[in-house]
Image (cartoon, helix red, strand yellow):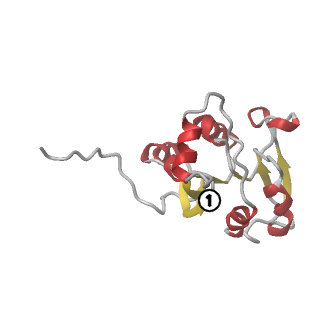
Amino acid sequence: MPRPTNVQNANAVRVREVANDKFYTPASLVDLHLSKFHNKFHGLTIYEPFAGQGTYLSRFPDYFPDCKFESTEIDNGTDFFDYTGTPDVVITNPPFSILKQVFERLYALNPLVISLVLNQHAITPCRIQNANAHGYFVTDYHLTRCDRWFGVACILTLRRDVSTNVISFDTIKHKLEA
């Protein structure tokens, strides 16, 4: 039997009766994500709010040897929405079904850097405007492929120590002429 395509996987997720956001991040994608920051953070607190199987957390010491690490994982009895720490950096692959709430909570935590692995379609002009309104700007937007996810994934990095996005966008709705 042939494996389902990315489109078939996406359609199956979209019509499921019970939400299940447990799409664990492949180690190679975690390494790609973390390599963007290799040896760039020193003495900071790096937080992984959706630790899952620990793929990010287990690699943090290799990429950030002199940083402090914190994590939460609902399946282990610690909930991101109850976290009271003050992270400097958040790096994770968040659950897609509650992405709006995740972004709002991340902004409330006020870290210097927020870097997420997301579905490419999760990044919209409205979402970027919302980030900007909270003082965060896009400093990196990297597209990649992830087998058995939804086709194209992206690594999105937001920072609050800059004042412009590295990508441009608008909210104009272009209409076809009759």
User: What element does badge 1 sit on?
Assistant: strand
- Give the quarter of the image for residue 141: bottom right
Q: From the viewer's perspective, is residue 53 above or below residue 32?
A: above
For the residue pair 27 and 32, the one nearer the viewer reads as 27
Q: Going 74% across and 53% down the picture, which residue do you hit? A: 88
Apparent side of residue 63 relative to residue 111 in the rendered image (left or right): right
Percent x, y for residue 143?
Answer: 54, 63
For the residue pair 3 and 122, the one nearer the viewer reads as 3
Percent x, y for residue 44?
Answer: 80, 58
Apparent side of residue 74 relative to residue 148 in the rendered image (left or right): right
Most extreme residue toward the front, as rendered? 1
Q: Going 53% across and 41% down the picture, which residue do you hit? A: 11
Apparent side of residue 11 relative to residue 3 in the rendered image (left or right): left
- Amino acid type at image mark 1: Cys
For the residue pair 59 and 89, the one nearer the viewer reads as 59
Apparent side of residue 167 relative to residue 149 in the rendered image (left or right): left
Q: From the viewer's perspective, is residue 39 above or below residue 103?
A: below
Most extreme residue toward the top, as rendered? 17
Percent x, y for residue 54?
Answer: 83, 52
Q: Residue under label 1, please give it.
A: 146
Most extreme residue toward the left, as rendered? 178
- In this rendering, the count of numbered labels is 1
Q: Going 56% across and 64% down the picture, which residue do you hit? A: 142
Question: Within 10 angstroms of label 1, few (less than 14), some, or many (20 or more) residues?
Answer: some
Q: Going 40% across and 59% down the picture, which residue do you hit? A: 168
Q: Quadrant of the C terminus?
A: top left
For the residue pair 16 and 1, the one nearer the viewer reads as 1
- Give the quarter of the image for residue 109: top right
Percent x, y for residue 165?
Answer: 48, 59
